[in-house]
Amino acid sequence: MGIVHIPRTVAAIAKGYWKRRTSPLSDREKSLVGLGFQQPPYVYTSRAGLFDVDVMFHMNNASYLTHAELARWEWSSFGGILDANLKSRSYFIVTASMIRFRREIPPLRRFDIETRIGGIDERNLWVYQTFHNSNEGPSENSTSNERGKILAQVFTQAVITKKGKVINPRGWIEDHFPATKEYLDDLSVSGGDDASLFDEKAARFKHLEEALRQSAAIYDEESNR
């Protein structure tokens, strides 16, 4: 697995740095793309290749998560998140992930993945990614609606750790990115009655994670008896 995955990860990081270097956007705009404030969001493009297709002759379910991870690596090197991790000796750690499949991706089909940070609270940050057919959008700078229908959605929960401890993502963003208070307030997940659609997703995700955590704890307790 590592023989294939590690080179693909290195290639994704290198591509993100190359796109950052050649992009006409300013450094501030590139950082805002990384955080999800600049429109359109960051776009990763790939193809359903030999290692992605299963016996059903379409992209395997697990490959969606693999490409979502590669898209996050590319996005992190383009938007400065990886540099911020290296500079502060911190780590971006995925703690949970959920995927919803909507339409299949046939062999050799090119597809795009849009990546953005959708929200943060005092502990977690959530990355929202959507798959689209590459040939349905006029260009890389197209908006989500111009790219055609969503093929799959990935919702990832992550934390930033430093010296083995989880740190507040808002403070970390303030230290390393040109994000204003208004930007950060827009990212904050309220989870209240007036919550936005994304807030509702995050709240339900946290509820599901807590239910799974409790289920695992009960299983572990019973297995130790």
Image (spheres, rainbow, N blue to C red):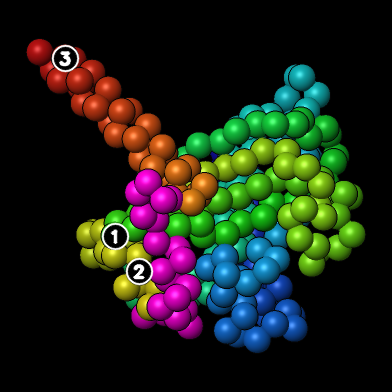
Q: Quadrant of residue 175?
A: bottom left
Task: Identify the residue at the far left of this view.
Answer: 225
From the top left corner, tell me how far across and down residue 37 is, in percent.
57, 70
- Which residue occupies 73% across, 25% down? 54
**Count of numbered tags:** 3
Disc 2 crowd, CA 10 A, few/some/many (<14, 14-19, 20+): many
Q: According to the image, label 2 marks what residue?
A: 170
Residue 122: give its label: 1
Q: According to the image, label 3 marks what residue?
A: 222
Q: Amino acid at mark 2?
A: Arg
Instruction: Classify residue 52 as left or right of residue 79.
Output: right
- Mark 2: secondary structure: helix
Disc 3 + disc 1, Cβ < 8 Å: no
Q: Which stretch is magenta?
A: 175-195
Q: Amino acid at mark 1?
A: Glu
User: How far separated are the C-alphas under marks 3 and 1?
Assistant: 33 Å
